[in-house]
Image (tube, rainbow, N blue to C red):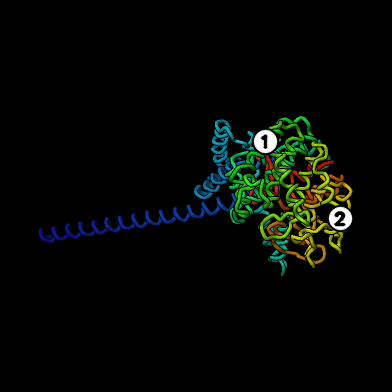
Amino acid sequence: MGRKDSELYDKNRLRERGNIRSTGYNYFILFKNMMSEEQVIKGINCLFRIGKWFALQVFLYFLMPYLWNYEYAVGTITLILLYTSLYVTYWNFISKELRFRRILFPYLIYLAIAIILWGVTDHWIASIGTCILLPFYGLSCLVGIQLIRKYSKRIRKKSRFGRVISRSAIAIILILLKSLSVLWMCQDHKSLDREKQDLFERKNYLLDKLVTSPQNVLNEMPSMIGVQFQGEWALYSCSMLSAALVNLSYLYPETKKENVLYIDSLINIVMSPEIRYYDTMRWNEDPLESLEGDNSHVSYLSHLAWMICGYKEIGGDKKYDKLLSDLCETMNRRILQSESLNLPTYPSESIYVPDMLVAIVALNQYADTHKGKYRSTVKKWIARAQKEWLDKETGILASFIDRNGNLYENAPVKGSYSALNCYYLTFIDEAFAKKQYEQLKTLFWKEGVISGLKEYWNYTCYVGIDIDAGPILFELGPSGTAFFAGSAAYFGDSNVRNEILATAEIAGHTIKIGNKRHYFLANIALVGESIMLAMRTNMK
């Protein structure tokens, strides 16, 4: 080979080597990009699985409070997310050969983090036992789901209706878990001694939500219902909690002193401009600054007066005596000025009988401690109610009447209004209340797997919505059912009371965090939680 041929050969070899290097670099970049894409896909898949398994475990956890003493704390939920994230990530990124050899590795990391959190966090609710055992709950969920999947596939292959059968089986399992949950939560309703912790923890929850600033109380009410109903619900929440605290003071006398202080705080909240704004807005004048006038304001004034009566009843001091005297004098004067002995809740609207009854309750309780003052007004109102305002078909006190005190033709008798009327009557006229209770039970009470009070006695409404009655399902109204518990408790009808509490558990689902518990639905309608506590403690 000549010199020129040798140089040409060397150049060709260098060119080929360069091409090889260039191709190798390109393959390296391509492989790197492919690995990055694979990692991204794995990461997305990992996040999806974490979300799926976390949601499933939290859902089942809510259905099984008997396993963990219903510790639904933020700490517990955080721990579920922690070990789920660790194990899903481990399973996605560790090779199949090493998965089972190092299966305890994520658990040890989880345990170290959980114990540190438990030790250094002030409000970490989960116990050390929960920290240690919680991943085994996750393992049980995993095994259970895998078994369900396995047998579901077999059923689908063997049976034409396999998909329907497998889904029905899952539904039955969920219903069974929920049923066990309801039985667990209702086991203490057999006596007040066993109920004590449940009542106190619900009280703690409501105090935390309502014994705060007036604006915070309003913020707890759903904004979607509008300013007027936000104000009404805030007033009712405070009023019913006050009534519950009075009841608890009689059931558990050792709580009386602290309950007086709580009611004092609730009275001040109700007296605030923020809470009474809903009434000011409708009447174009402040209810407390217009006591000398003739406009009704009966809803706001009556609840405030009733709360002060409760405050005095369990040992409150004389700080509100002058205000209570003025409130009762004003309501009495305005009632007697009306030919029908009734006052409208708002301008140009009908008479809402439950709102009027709060005023009669307040006047009656004032009469108990002031030598019968205003008792004559109470008796006049009750006499006219029994003579003129009973529905002709049912014998039940009307839900609403016109401004002249006349019954409307074909006006519905509503379960929610009637049950609330009956509850208020227990404070005024026991015999009248007893007749109303028995008639309500005959016409409106519906017993079954889910028992409760029907919203309408004379026609079927399986699904409906009402701002006062709430969502009507299978004929039952939540408000009427809750209010009916107040009369059932007063007249010692423990079967009805306990069935209502079971229905409340089915629909509401109790959540316990530390020394507080409440129905899950209280996150939407706090007023319902206050009402239920007042009603179930309304013992004679």
Q: Which residue is under mark 2? A: 386
Q: Nearer the viewer, residue 154 or 48?
A: 48
Q: Is residue 323 visible?
A: yes
Q: Is residue 27 left or right of residue 250?
A: left
Q: Which residue is under mark 1? A: 264
Residue 292 is marked as: none
**Residue 68 against residue 22 in the figure, above or below:** above
**Residue 308 against residue 15 in the figure, above or below:** above
Q: Residue sitting at 69 percent across and 36 percent down?
A: 322
* Residue 479 horizontal/vertical position (percent): 74, 54
Question: What secondary structure is marked by label 1?
Answer: helix
Q: Nearer the viewer, residue 407 or 534?
A: 407
- Which corner quadrant holds the C terminus? top right
Q: Residue sitting at 59 percent across and 35 percent down?
A: 124
Type of amino acid under label 1? Asp
Of labels 2 and 1, earlier in sequence is: 1
Mark 2 or 1: in front is: 2
* Residue 418 horizontal/vertical position (percent): 79, 55
Type of amino acid under label 2? Gln
